[in-house]
Amino acid sequence: MGATPKNIPLSKLSLDIQNPRLDNPESTKDVIAAMLEQQGNKILRMAEDIVEHGLDPSSILMVIPHEEKEDRYVVVEGNRRFTALKLLGHPENAGKYEKRFKPLADRLPESILKAIPCVVFPTREETNHWIKLKHTGENEGAGVVTWGGIERARFEQGALKRNRPGLQVLDFLKKHADLDGELKDAPQKVSITTLERIIQDPDARGELGLTIEKGHVYSVYPADETTKCLLRIVRDLVSGDFNVKDVYYKEDRKKYISSLAEDRPNPAKRLKEKHSLAELPSKPLSPTGTGTTPTTRGKSTRPRRTLIPPTFAAEIGHQRLRTICHELKKLPVEDYPNAAAVMLRVFLELSLDHV
DNA sequence: CGCTTTCATTTCCATAGTGG
DNA sequence: CCACTATGGAAATGAAAGCG
């Protein structure tokens, strides 16, 4: 152990000859040449970003002491960043990219190159684990788990100002519909770009009674009509046998929308005014259950959706029976009436045999 | 000119293949 | 026999073209 943070000037840092991105370079000159050869434009882009925003403070260079030269360090992690910095310091080494690095170098505040935040490790071995985590994927979750479409959309809508229509649809459904059973984690599972492909098609929008202005989604139908059809679409999206290719081209989308049939909103119920999906008040929990106010905690007022109540407790000695019981607590009867019926029969017959 | 649609590139995923 | 890797194909996303 003993990784210590330290600010080191550019002049005291060396490129790593053993950089895994490169195939056997001889000298640091080669390293730079090879890095530029491999990904010149990416490094240029990074240099631009550094000039504009400075160095990413959350991600510092990992260095180890130089083997020969006292007082110098070798950069073992962050070589792309370091190459960008080095070329910002000495654009004359950038070969064919020189002309493009020069103006960037002129704009770079000098202080940046004087003290580059690094973390010093005593030996290369001690860096291996951390480098692996950064570069070899998720590592069962120990490493970097990259964002999917939904996470990205959330970020774009939240932190950046860009509105994502798909996200508004999902948030709307979370507020206004009971997402349970197969749809419980639908908001995480749907491919948001596919959803947006549908609702960004003007013809589809017309059928669904939606409009999008500056990324904000509006509906001209009452909430329950909107919910009905959006829920259907989301259900299709997570159903497994549905993906982009079903709505890839305009013609596909047309077919798909008409296949929604009565799940489309009823034109008779069209409202005069459009309203924003985001601003609709939440729907009351159970519109029908007025008298029996379920203020008491404990029992759920929601109608049961499975054959065996999920709370049902029984000691079942038989392995297979136990798992069948478990499955019957999860299988939504509405959606799988036959499977549920057959399973129940098997469950009963096996139970009798077992007794 | 901005919004749609189509095309191209990148990324993801499943499966066959390979070696321990 | 199992676990891991390479590979091809499909899907998602980004970019360009097209259209009104």
Image: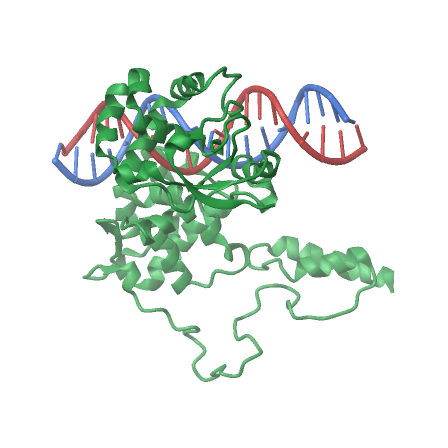
Chain colours: A green, B blue, C red
Would residue A129 be visible to someone looking at this image?
yes
User: In the rendered image, which quarter is residue A84 located in?
Assistant: top left
Quadrant occupied by the N terminus of chain A: top right
Quadrant occupied by the C terminus of chain A: bottom right
Q: Residue furthest front?
A: A70
Q: Position of residue A272 (x, y in %)?
A: 19, 61
Left or right: where B1 falls relative to A112: left
Does residue A63 sit above or below A336 in this rendering? Answer: above
Does residue A348 sit above or below A164 in this rendering? Answer: below
Please name whichever residue, A91 or A315, is drawn nearer the observer in this view of the structure. A91
Taking the spot 51% from the left edge, 44% from the top edge, the residue there is A145
Marker count (numbered): 0
Taking the spot 36% from the left edge, 28% from the top edge, the residue there is A86
Please name whichever residue, A158 or A278, is drawn nearer the observer in this view of the structure. A158
Would residue A264 be visible to someone looking at this image?
no
Please name whichever residue, A45 or A170, is drawn nearer the observer in this view of the structure. A45
User: In the rendered image, which quarter is residue A280 located in?
Assistant: bottom left
Q: Position of residue A241 (x, y in %)?
A: 52, 40
Taking the spot 43% from the left edge, 18% from the top edge, the residue there is A34
Q: Position of residue B9 (x, y in %)?
A: 38, 24
Q: Position of residue A26 (x, y in %)?
A: 50, 15
Please name whichever residue, A170 or A345, is drawn nearer the observer in this view of the structure. A170
Left or right: where A219 falls relative to B17: left
Does residue C1 sit above or below A316 in this rendering? Answer: above
Does residue A155 sit above or below A127 in this rendering? Answer: below
